Image (cartoon, grey):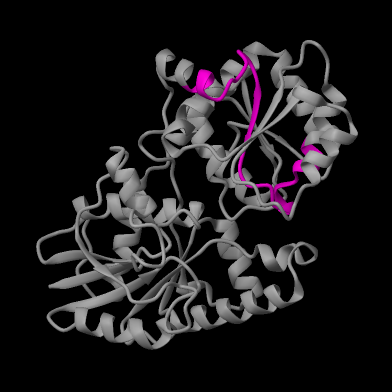
Amino acid sequence: MSRYILDARTAVPRFPGIGRYVSNLASALPPQLTAGEELTLLESPATAEPALTSARALEQEGACQIPGKTIIATATPFDIRQQWRIPPLLKRLQADREALYHSPYYLMPYRTGLPTLLTFYDIIPLRFPKAVPARARLFFRLAATLALRAADRVVAISEAARDDLTSHFRVPASKVSVTSLAAGASYRPQPPAEVARVRDAYRLPGEFILYLGINKPHKNLPALVDAYAQTASPHMPPLVIAGAWDIRYPQPQQHAARRQLGDAVRFLGPVAERDLPALYSAATLFIFPSLYEGFGLPVLEAMACGTPVACSNTPSLTEVAGDAALLFDPHSVTEIRDAMAELIEDGVQRARRAEQGLARARRYSWQATAAATLRCYREMLGLPLED
């Protein structure tokens, strides 16, 4: 008898990326469990976050099912009291069977009393020090170091993330496994009626170039706006920049205003989860000029929706996209410009990239991610491994 405790306290709107990881993993794990294995979700205190986590919201929309036992925690990941409140809770869950704890975030209890698995994503605060205050960088390094020391094993979301982890924190490679992310089941080419609904809801034109993601400095949006300005013509579709918006980084809007791009560049803001597949499907081209990613899930989601992709040639994005995307150097505004222009002007290449992207996306699935994660669980508890 074994219990796998997945910390789902980050499956809340505050953590859109990590929350989607937790939600999809929580959905894909239970069907692969054998007799005597149980998944337990440790969820956020109802008083600290919205009553419905993003996992439960996805479940209500039919995007995933979250079976398994749910335990409400008594502290959020940001609450120092988790250090003495969560371990006794974990110990009680261990009382009747072998158990392990899986944290998807480095803010976690650092003495769990159980075998502990940590998911590691990226080292953005260390790779982009000018964009992160010194105090925040110090806190990240300290908290990440404590989490890595507490973990008996670590899963990285890409080979590139594993390399960053082992080089910057000197974690032994033998301690780290790679479990790739995947596009959710709802990310597939959408029917015309659904595309039309989303196009009308967000007042989108018939053709447009799409970027989806936050506006933090490593996403390289000022360079994208500058590159688009160099391609702007009556024949160039507008650029739509969508996703969560951090008001600390207004530079993309400032660049658009300085270049007097007007309605040619539109800042859409956050988009409802259920609308994302149709938004990708509606786009003529998806472009992702990020300087650094731990994985690059939007690239895979766009491919899964049949949208041709142009993206940075950084290690993780090259790893994810393979030869299905048109790659460019994100440090070169000229290369970003040329990639956009090439795919917009070449319909044959767009169609080929779309087909290649669909094939590439099929190589990734949350079922495979869950299977690799479950293998880590079983190895950590010394259980027999399924063939």
Q: Position of residue 253 (x, y in %)?
A: 78, 39
- Quadrant of the drawing holding the C terminus: bottom left
Residue 207 drawn in magenta: yes
Q: Residue furthest front?
A: 47
Q: Position of residue 153 (x, y in %)?
A: 42, 74
Question: With 308 as the anchor, is 343 left or right in this view?
Answer: right
Residue span colored magenta:
198-224
Question: With 4 as the anchor, is 173 left or right in this view?
Answer: right
Residue 162 drawn in magenta: no
Q: Position of residue 162 (x, y in %)?
A: 56, 64
Q: Is residue 157 above or below residue 274?
A: below
Question: With 254 as the anchor, is 123 left or right in this view?
Answer: left
Q: Is residue 276 above or below residue 47?
A: above
Q: Is residue 168 above or below residue 156?
A: below
Residue at position x 75%, y 46% in the image = 220
Residue at position x 40%, y 79% in the image = 152
Question: With 2 as the anchor, is 218 left or right in this view?
Answer: right
